[in-house]
């Protein structure tokens, strides 16, 4: 058994190449081999969001605070709130983040496949973000 104590890993700011706005990431726990799962707490300030991206094994999000938006390519944007959980299937192009006026925090659970958990793509434009 392994216990990761709250706050034992340093917070980090998400890179501008993959995110728009102010986004803080806090590590929660990662499995050890042969496991391939990682979980982190991600906080988006109002207007902040990920770039478009995919995950080779899909992704689970669990909203813990605030209000956010999630969108898969070709589908309408959806609002999410604390207690909501989201599943993005493997390879589904999507983005997620805070609403324009409210911060949002979620737990992100991802699985590594061949050493990679995510493929980053282009940024969500301000126009596309606002239009949903």
Image: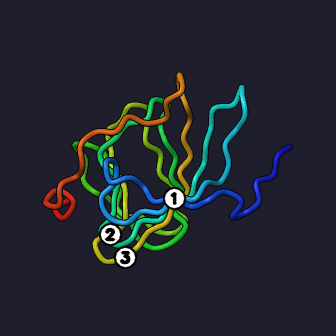
Contact between marks 2 and 1 (CB within 8 A): the answer is no
User: Marks 2 and 1: which is nearer the front?
Assistant: 1
In the image, 23 versus 78, the foreground residue is 23
In the image, 7 versus 66, the foreground residue is 7
Number of marks:
3
Residue at position x 53%, y 51% in the image: 108
Residue at position x 47%, y 63% in the image: 24
As drawn, the label of residue 95 is none
Residue at position x 56%, y 46% in the image: 109
Q: Quadrant of the C terminus?
A: bottom left
Closer to the N terminus: mark 3 or mark 1? Answer: 1
User: Marks 3 and 1: which is nearer the front?
Assistant: 1
The percent coordinates of residue 89 (x first, y second) are 43, 36
Colour theme = rainbow
Q: Residue furthest bottom?
A: 101
Contact between marks 2 and 3 (CB within 8 A): the answer is yes
Side (left or right) of 37 relative to 104: right
**Residue located beneath label 3 in the image:** 102
Within-10-Å neighbours for mark 3: few <14, some 14–19, many 20+: some
- Tell me: residue 22, above or below residue 128: below
Real-space Cα separation, disc 2 to disc 3, in angstroms: 5 Å
The percent coordinates of residue 8 (x first, y second) are 71, 59
Within-10-Å neighbours for mark 2: few <14, some 14–19, many 20+: many
In the image, 1 versus 71, the foreground residue is 1
**Residue located beneath label 2 in the image:** 99
Real-space Cα separation, disc 3 to disc 1, in angstroms: 21 Å
Q: Quadrant of residue 72?
A: top left
**Residue located beneath label 1 in the image:** 12
Q: Quadrant of residue 30?
A: top right
């Amino acid at each position: 058994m392994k216990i990761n104590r709250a706050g034992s890993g340093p917070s980090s700011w998400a890179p501008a190449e993959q995110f728009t706005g102010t986004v803080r990431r806090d590590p929660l726990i990662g499995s050890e081999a042969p496991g391939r799962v990682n979980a982190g707490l991600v906080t988006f300030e109002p207007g902040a969001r990920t770039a478009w991206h995919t995950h080779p094994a899909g992704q689970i999000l669990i909203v813990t605070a605030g209000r956010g938006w999630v969108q898969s390519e070709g589908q309408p944007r959806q609002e999410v709130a604390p207690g909501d959980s989201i599943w993005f299937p493997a390879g589904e192009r999507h983005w997620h983040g805070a609403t324009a006026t409210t911060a949002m925090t979620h737990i992100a659970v991802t699985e590594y496949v061949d050493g990679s958990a995510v493929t980053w793509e282009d940024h969500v434009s301000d126009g596309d973000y606002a239009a949903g």
